[in-house]
Image: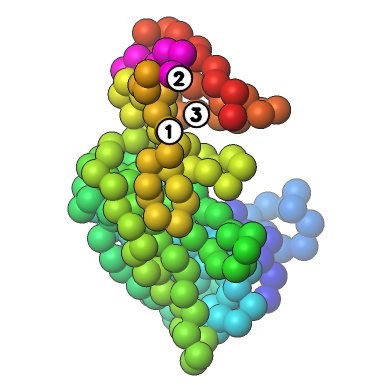
Amino acid sequence: MSLNCLLANTDTCRYDCSRCLTGRTHRKILSVRGCAKVKNPGNKALLPRLPTSKTPDLIVQGGKDALLRVLDRRNLSGKGGPRHVGGGLQTLPTPGGCALLTQPTVWTDPASQAVWVFVDDDCAMGAYQVVTDAAGGTTLKRAWTVKVKATTPIIAGNVLFAATSGAVLALDLRTGTQLWSSAGQHAGGSIGGIHWESPIVANGILYCADENSHLTAYGI
């Protein structure tokens, strides 16, 4: 089955819909393959292909209802055809039980090839391991939670970076242990308050803007 699909949230009916293209990508959208009903859908993350899973092509979708949903990209509704809703493979709470407005971040551990998903909701930051059992069933298992409200995290050099109001944090990906803070004594200065600002990394430099109209850079 082709996966040349456009995945889109529709605010009017609160669905996460897969509108699939036929043949070349410039042709018009012809049909809706299926919809997974999500209240106030937020951002989604596509997982890498999971070759040992019965559902190897998955999405993790969050929303304002403080829930994460694991969805099958090939069969969003679970009904195997268009004009159906529902069909999530797993539903679980966000790390802090608060609304999710940020983008989940996905990482493949280079040592074990395990897939991880990192989520920042309005109350906490958390990590989930993607686990596939012997029968091919795939679920998210929470690995750690830190009571920090941050914007969308990024990964550079196998370290998780996230911005909070007043500081950029570096965390251990596997444990959530804080490794560094821009608010620390030897960091050279920190950022101001933030709203939606998230860090980016380019050429070994981390950049983060803040609500004071400052752009701060750190070598990593």
> Which residue does the image show at 69% across and 70% down from the upper left?
2
Q: Is residue 100 left or right of residue 16?
A: left
Foreground mark, 3 or 2? 2
Q: Decide: is 194 above or below 150.
A: above
The CA distance from mark 3 to mark 1 is 15 Å
Instruction: From the top left corner, tell me how far across and down residue 157 is, in percent.
Output: 61, 42
N-term mark: 3 or 1: 1
Q: Amino acid at mark 1?
A: Trp
- In the rendered image, which quarter contains the C terminus? top right
Q: Is residue 127 left or right of residue 23?
A: left
In this figure, which colouring scheme has been used for the structure? Answer: rainbow
Residue 191 on the magenta span: yes
Residue tagged 1: 180
Mark nearer the N terminus (1 vs 2): 1
The part of the chain drawn in magenta is 186-195
Any part of residue 32 in sight: no
Q: Residue at x 20, y 53 (%)?
A: 97
Residue occupied by mark 3? 199
Check the image and name the residue furthest to the front.
186
Please tell me which residue is depicted at 38% across the width and 41% down the height of the picture.
Answer: 178
Q: Is residue 145 left or right of residue 22?
A: left
Q: CA distance from mark 1 to mark 2?
A: 9 Å
Please name which of the two marks, 3 or 1, marks the residue nearer to the observer: 1
Determine contact: label 1, label 2, CB under 8 Å. Answer: yes
Please, what is the three-letter code of the amino acid marked with disc 3?
Answer: Pro
Q: Characterize the local packing of mark 2: few (<14), some (14-19) or many (20 or more) Cα atoms within 10 angstroms.
A: few
- Residue 140: in sight, yes or no? yes
Magenta span contains residue 136: no
Residue 125 vertical placement versus 82 (above, below): above
